[in-house]
Image (cartoon, rainbow, N blue to C red):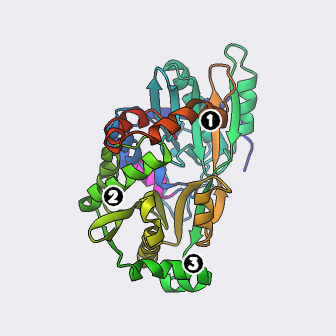
């Protein structure tokens, strides 16, 4: 690929802000891009805005007349378009948690999707301009690959004498991905004997798993609220899940594991192209000996195989942690995430240190709160925490 000048990128591409009427055009571009993920789809910003009221921005880069047509990231055989890239952004603004532009909050990915480095750079430069306009302290771009023009963006930021801007990349978390065989039976044969025994145990204990949609949401959320309180984390609003099911009704499903009509474990998945993503999954800790979590994942993997998905995404984990090891035993392999940060206020940014210092005490106190209280006030807090 040819080299492009980051400083001159905005001269080659026109940036426009998409409206709701541009959804079909936006998703048409996303579907044919090699590096597109579920979180680039137009509906995700709708979920964030409808659930929490956060201000959203949809940036589209268009090729100017006469500009060279670079489509190296577009799948072969796809129709031509003058869209050169897209960038979805949500603004989280709070007196305590700060004012941040994120692509995308609450999710593993999002970020810039472009045909080439010049289009990529033009979108990031516009994001920086927008960030300054709305008074944001930083911009977070969550990527599954390193941004190709990042070194150029970093050099431009470093040379800006008017307002100091710093950049950094954090790659301490990973998606856990399992390449799926044609059937769950083949998958089970590939597992170690101990794990196969654990998978068979829940059925012997009388546990069953139901698969459905919105009709299972209430039972899903009961388990989710309890698990989040156990982890010391404010819980998302049930409206978040309801809106996801609404926006992605044809590609989403809920799984709930029961014993005697009591929900013990639950998960919500959404598919995109050949990948089925596990967005949220929880289990009640006191029933862990029954193996409800094992049955939950078995049924989600079975669903993925039966619906023609080639990859199951277990979700985000930190290497070495318990959830990482749980996913690894199923055969999942890590793919490092690359979260790019642009600090607009001249202060260096360290996500790990901020999280530890700001939330350590809060987590301890949250675990001691009554469950109904955490369910009531959790969403009002969680909406401002982008993780």
Q: Mark 1 highlights which residue?
A: 356
Q: Which of 145/204 is in front?
A: 204
The answer to which image quadrant residue 279 occupies is: bottom left
Q: Where is residue 81 in the image (x, y as percent from the top left)?
A: 48, 50
Dot 1: within a 10 Å radius of its alpha carbon, few (fewer than 14), some, or many (20 or more) residues?
few
Q: Which residue is drawn at 43% across and 52% down?
A: 227
Q: Position of residue 270 (x, y in %)?
A: 41, 60
Q: Is 121 left, or right, of 238 in this rendering? A: right
Q: Where is residue 166 in the image (x, y as percent from the top left)?
A: 70, 26
User: Residue 29: within the magenta?
Assistant: yes
Q: Distance between the residues labelled 3 and 1?
A: 34 Å
- Mark 2 vs 1, N-terminal side: 2
Q: Mark 3 highlights which residue?
A: 195
Residue stretch in magenta: 25-32
Q: Residue at x 33, y 53 (%)?
A: 221
Tell me, yes or no, if residue 87 can be seen here: yes
Give above or below for 92 relative to 264.
above
Give above or below for 104 relative to 30.
above
Q: Mark 2 highlights which residue?
A: 220
- In the drawing, what numbered circle is on residue 279? none
The answer to which image quadrant residue 120 occupies is: top right
Q: Which of 356/77 is in front?
A: 356
Dot 2: within a 10 Å radius of its alpha carbon, few (fewer than 14), some, or many (20 or more) residues?
many
* Extreme-top residue of the structure: 162
Q: Where is residue 365 in the image (x, y as percent from the top left)?
A: 48, 35
Q: Which of 312/209 is in front?
A: 209
Main SS of the magenta part reads helix
């Amino acid at each position: 690929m040819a080299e492009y000048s980051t400083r001159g990128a905005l001269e080659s591409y026109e940036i426009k802000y998409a409206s709701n009427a541009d959804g079909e055009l936006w998703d048409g571009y996303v579907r044919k891009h090699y590096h597109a993920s579920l979180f680039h789809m137009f509906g995700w910003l709708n979920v964030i805005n409808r659930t929490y009221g956060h201000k959203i921005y949809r940036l589209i880069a268009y090729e100017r007349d006469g500009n060279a047509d670079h489509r190296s990231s577009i799948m072969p055989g796809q129709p031509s378009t003058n869209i050169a890239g897209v960038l979805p952004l949500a603004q989280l603004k709070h007196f305590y948690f700060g004012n941040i532009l994120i692509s995308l909050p609450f999710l593993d990915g999002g970020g810039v999707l472009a045909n080439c480095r010049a289009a990529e750079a033009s979108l990031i430069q516009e994001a920086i301009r927008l960030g300054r306009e709305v008074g944001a302290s930083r911009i977070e771009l969550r990527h599954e690959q390193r941004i190709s023009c990042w070194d150029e963006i970093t050099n431009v930021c470093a040379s800006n004498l008017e307002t100091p801007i710093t950049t950094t990349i954090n790659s301490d978390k990973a998606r856990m991905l399992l390449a799926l065989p044609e059937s769950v039976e083949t998958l089970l044969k590939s597992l170690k004997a101990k794990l196969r025994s654990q998978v068979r145990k829940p059925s012997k204990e009388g546990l069953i798993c139901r698969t459905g949609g919105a009709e299972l949401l209430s039972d899903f959320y009961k388990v989710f609220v309890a698990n989040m309180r156990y982890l010391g984390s404010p819980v998302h609003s049930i409206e978040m899940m309801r809106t996801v099911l609404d926006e992605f009704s044809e590609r989403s499903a809920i799984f709930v594991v029961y014993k005697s009509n009591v929900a013990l474990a639950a998960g919500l998945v959404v598919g995109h192209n050949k990948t089925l993503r596990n967005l949220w999954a929880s289990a009640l800790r006191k029933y862990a000996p029954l193996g409800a979590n094992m049955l939950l994942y078995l049924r989600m993997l079975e669903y993925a195989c039966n619906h023609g998905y080639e990859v199951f995404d277990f979700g985000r984990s930190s290497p070495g942690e318990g959830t990482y090891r749980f996913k690894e035993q199923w055969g999942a392999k890590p793919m490092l995430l690359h979260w790019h940060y642009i600090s607009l206020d001249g202060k260096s940014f360290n996500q790990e240190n901020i999280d530890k210092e700001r939330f350590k005490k809060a987590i301890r106190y949250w675990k001691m709160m009554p469950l109904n209280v955490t369910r009531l006030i959790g969403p009002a807090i969680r909406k401002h925490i982008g993780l």
